[in-house]
Image (cartoon, coloured by chain):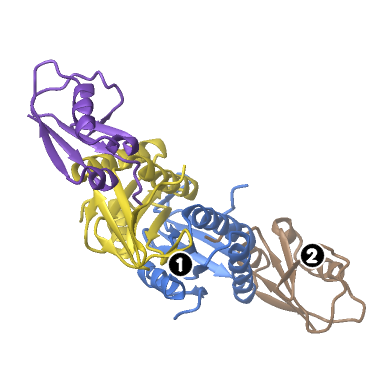
Chain colours: A purple, B brown, C yellow, D blue
Amino acid sequence: MIKVLFFGPVADRVQMRETQVEYTPGMTLHDVIAHIGMQYPGAFSIVSFIAVNQTQVHDKQTVLHDNDEIAFMAKFSGG
Amino acid sequence: MIKVLFFGPVADRVQMRETQVEYTPGMTLHDVIAHIGMQYPGAFSIVSFIAVNQTQVHDKQTVLHDNDEIAFMAKFSGG
Amino acid sequence: MSNPVRIQTEDFSQDEEINALKVGSKRIGGIATFLGCARDFSEGRDVSEIGFEAYGPMALAEMKKLREEAISRFALLDARIVHRVTTVHAGDNIVFIAAAAEHRAAALEACRWMIDELKERVPIWKKEITPQGDSWVTPHP
Amino acid sequence: MSNPVRIQTEDFSQDEEINALKVGSKRIGGIATFLGCARDFSEGRDVSEIGFEAYGPMALAEMKKLREEAISRFALLDARIVHRVTTVHAGDNIVFIAAAAEHRAAALEACRWMIDELKERVPIWKKEITPQGDSWVTPHP
């Protein structure tokens, strides 16, 4: 399973904080984005950062592993 | 009388913290400097700032008034 | 001594943070700090509360990296970063940054760099709660 | 509330100074501070004590002017300047500067400006007392 986390403004749009996506060997970050994006059209317009296992990634072709944790995040506004 | 104050490094050189100079009408800052400088040659080489009545003055032709307070000061090193 | 990098709900004391810095080195000549507080007025609206949400483990990891980078980049003797994640009211403390160095320039520059970078890099979000409703804060570019 | 500009022998508390700033305004978004402390090492020599001497009335007047100029130049909500004039040991507090503003940039810039200007403008002198003897500190250009 791939754990998918949502925070702040993104969590408000998808109306949940966490979901799971079935892991299939060879799947990429792009596959997860497509899957979630289909379920929640519009949610991704405010996603500015994506982290895989708590590290920001820029390459959507990043290959995922079972039990990876993905976070979709709007622009940060801490401080 | 003109009150003359010395602080820190300057006080160490003249070996006092305060002295007085007789006031004479029309006397200028330059007159006081000449008077003190004669008594304590070398003391003025480290004087970087002069204040009259707690305000820094640059013009040695500044005319003094009776009871003025003059301070001869080395470079500041507070903070 | 408390951890130099923390995310917490409770308030903090500047004096305690400063003392924690000082016990580590007698060579500190200057400590620059930045304290972010909740304002009761933002973008022309009254703000009654500000709520924070963090991606906790990633936020803490980024804050630790930030501290280490600041120490190495500005040759600091030590640094501390504390961020509250809770609901705060006007006047309450939100974030605290401290940079200790032998001389003031490094401390002041590092403090500024850390708060600027924190806002860019640490996954924390702020929601303003106003009489007219709530809204997530969109950072200025 | 204590005076925002002070010369004193006794130590001060950052928390108390910060609280004094906060009671004045609920619009403060950021407070930048600089704390100068005594180091046990300066210019390659061990320093056991540092003694301070001030031209008291002029120093206080200059510090008040400095605070007012900073408030107007950086549109601060408030500012505080405290300088100890006494003999201090390694780790002891010497000077405290705080700048409170609606946003962080003004607070940080004003804090830096005030400590830089204080060193240039305020008639206070520092003597380092070392095992090898005393010497007045000559400021770096």
Q: Is residue B48 above or below residue D60?
A: above
Kindly report the distance in space between the C-alpha atoms of the residues bearing marks 1 and 2.
Answer: 54 Å
Q: Tell me which chain the residue with mark 1 is part of.
A: D
Q: Position of residue C28 (x, y in %)?
A: 39, 52
- Give the percent coordinates (x, y) of residue C26: 34, 53
Left or right, A75 with reference to D35: left
Mark linked to residue B37: 2
Q: Between residues D99 and C43, which one lies in front from this camera angle?
A: C43
Which residue type carries mark 1? Arg
Q: Position of residue C59 (x, y in %)?
A: 25, 43
Crowding around mark 1 (Cα neighbors within 10 Å: few <14, some 14 to 19, many 20+) is many
Chain hosting mark 2: B
Mark number displayed over residue C9: none
Left or right side of D98 for B30: right
Does C116 sit left or right of B30 as displayed?
left
For the point 47% across and 42% down, the residue is: C141
Q: CB of mark 1 within 8 Å of CB of mark 2?
A: no
- Callout 2 secondary element: helix
Residue at 47%, 45% (x, y): give it.
C109
For disc 2, the neighbor class at 10 Å (few under 14, some 14 to 19, many from 20) is: some
**Residue C4 appears in the figure:** no
